[in-house]
Amino acid sequence: MKASEIRKLSPEELDAKLLELKDELFNLRFQQAIDQLDNPMRISAVKKDIARIKTVQRDVELNGSKA
């Protein structure tokens, strides 16, 4: 997911997407622990998406909505 796509989402959608990605990260880590993970690079991609969402949320918090 690109930062430009994330910036288009509403705050409620950002929260929902963040929860979804955190759940996915948990499941990926669980799969890795039991050696059933197909694509280990997916973990880093999900972590980066979580960081992008948190960055956009913080930007909105500091500069107001869609400033």
Image (spheres, rainbow, N blue to C red):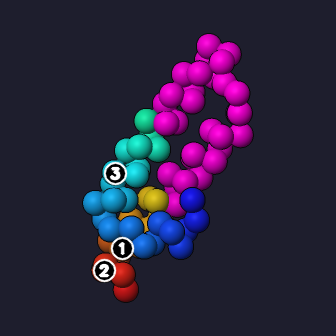
Q: Nearer the viewer, residue 21 or 55?
A: 21
Between disc 3 and disc 1, whose residue precedes? 3
Q: In this rendering, is residue 31 above or below 56?
A: above
| Kind of residue at disc 3 | Ala
Find residue 43 and report its image quarter. top right
Query: Where residue 65 sits: x, y (%)?
Result: 31, 79
**Label 2 SS:** loop
Residue stretch rendered in magenta on the structure: 24-52
The residue that mark 2 highlights is 64
Between marks 3 and 1 in the image, the one whose residue lies nearer the viewer:
3
Which residue occupies the extreme bottom position in the image? Answer: 67
Quarter occupied by the C terminus: bottom left
| Residue at the disc numbered 1 | 60
Tags 1 and 2 touching, CB below 8 Å: yes
Q: Residue at x 59, y 21 (%)?
A: 31
Q: Position of residue 28 (x, y in %)?
A: 57, 30
Q: Is residue 9 above or below residue 28?
A: below
Q: Which residue is mark 3?
A: 16
Crowd rating for badge 3 (residues with CA inside 10 Å; few <14, some 14–19, many 20+): few
